[in-house]
Image (cartoon, rainbow, N blue to C red):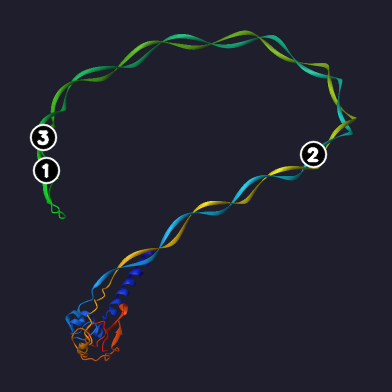
Amino acid sequence: MQRLLVAGLVLGGFLLSADAAQAFGGRRGHGGSASECCGHGEMWGGGCGAANECCAAPAMEARVMTGQRPVCKTRMVQREVTEMVSRMVQVPVQYTVTEAVLTPVKKTITVCEAQWSEVPFQYTVCVPVMHAETRSVCEWQCVPRQVPCTFTVCHQVMTPEKRTVCDFVCEPQQVTCQVCVCRSVPVTCVDPCTGCTRTTCHTVREMVPVTRTVMVRRPVMREVTVNVCRTVAEQKTETRTVMERVPVMREVTVNVCHNEQQQRQGTRRVCNMVPVQKEVTTMCCTYHPVQKTGTSCKMICEPVKRMVNACETYTEWEQYSYTVMVPKAPAPAPQAPMAMAPMGCGDCGHGCGACGQECGGNDRGGHKRGGLFGGRKHRGGCGGCGSTVSCCG
């Protein structure tokens, strides 16, 4: 916004300068500029027969102008806001509950009672009976016996033998190789901005031959005597003792148990369930609805107004000064004596019609009132000297 305002004020200053230039009699002869007028025999505000000072561009002067522009500012203001505040309140409520009521009730019921009685019965039992019997059994006896056997035994035999082995011998050898070496070289340069000469060190890499000693492994063949271990198999025959199991039959007497069944008589107790009518009193539970009154917590939201600090942006118009260039008003020409009035309308020393036109005979009506500073200017009539005096009486 401020940039648009400043641009509008500068454009207004240029238009004001153009109007001021026209007010001082600056017109373009035949649609050209002042330079064209001087180049083609024409001049500002008149014909081509005027003096040389009439062809000069008007002098410019600085003028301080005062204007207004909007400025955005901020301020803290108090504003009333409404907020919703929640709170808990106690609210009376009515509710219904179901309560249990116990009432004694007499009833006749049938129950089963247990009655015990002795009942005779017959049962069979097994009675073990022991008697001796003769049995033949087979037993195993271990009998030692000598048995010849043949087996193989392996013996280790060490035999010296010659072998050819390859050993490596390290021999020194001179080797030349290229190594990259970095060194600093002073370089003088001239600063293109200041023209000062300065010396800086630049790192230069170069390859340098270096001789070093390396150990080279060379194979050497030689004979050595080593002990070689071989395994030799040998057959042997010996006698060993083995145990053999031999079956032996013999008779033994053992006791044998047999079970014999025997019938016996006994009694046992038997329980019989007999139905019996009884009158009992029971508690009957009935449920009845009951209205009760209580309180309940309820959350309600209420609008609350309060004052808060808020940042407000507003616009103010402030005055400021700026400088524009405007044409400088020419100094007023000295008044000619009354006796010399016939010699011309202005102070240029030429009479009316010196440029070939009479007063009021130009294409735009002769005289024109001179813009900002008043006075009458000649526009191509009496000499065209730009005088502020009245022309042609």
The residue nearer to you, when weighing 196 against 333, is 333
Q: Position of residue 155 (x, y in %)?
A: 28, 16
The residue carrying mark 1 is 207
Figure quadrant of the N terminus: bottom left
**Number of the front mark, 3 or 1:** 1
Q: Label 2's element?
A: strand
The residue carrying mark 2 is 99
The residue carrying mark 3 is 212
Q: Is residue 312 left or right of residue 348?
A: right
Judge whether 300 appears above or below 393 on screen. Answer: above
Pick whichever of labels 3 and 2 is earlier in the sequence.
2
For mark 2, does the 10 Å Cα neighbourhood hold few (<14), some (14 to 19), or many (20 or more) residues?
few
The residue under label 2 is which amino acid type? Glu
Pick whichever of labels 3 and 1 is earlier in the sequence.
1
Q: Is residue 136 left or right of residue 237?
A: right
Judge whether 108 appears above or below 191 on screen. Answer: above
Pick whichever of labels 2 and 1 is earlier in the sequence.
2
Location of residue 372 (image quadrant): bottom left
Q: CA distance from mark 3 to mark 2?
A: 112 Å
For mark 3, does the 10 Å Cα neighbourhood hold few (<14), some (14 to 19), or many (20 or more) residues?
few
Q: Position of residue 196 (x, y in %)?
A: 13, 51
Location of residue 184 (image quadrant): top left
The residue under label 3 is which amino acid type? Arg
Tell me what residue is drawn at x 63 percent, y 11 percent. Answer: 135
Judge whether 277 appears above or below 378 on screen. Answer: above
Badge number at residue 50 = none
Q: CA distance from mark 3 to mark 1?
A: 15 Å
Q: Is residue 57 left or right of residue 8?
A: left
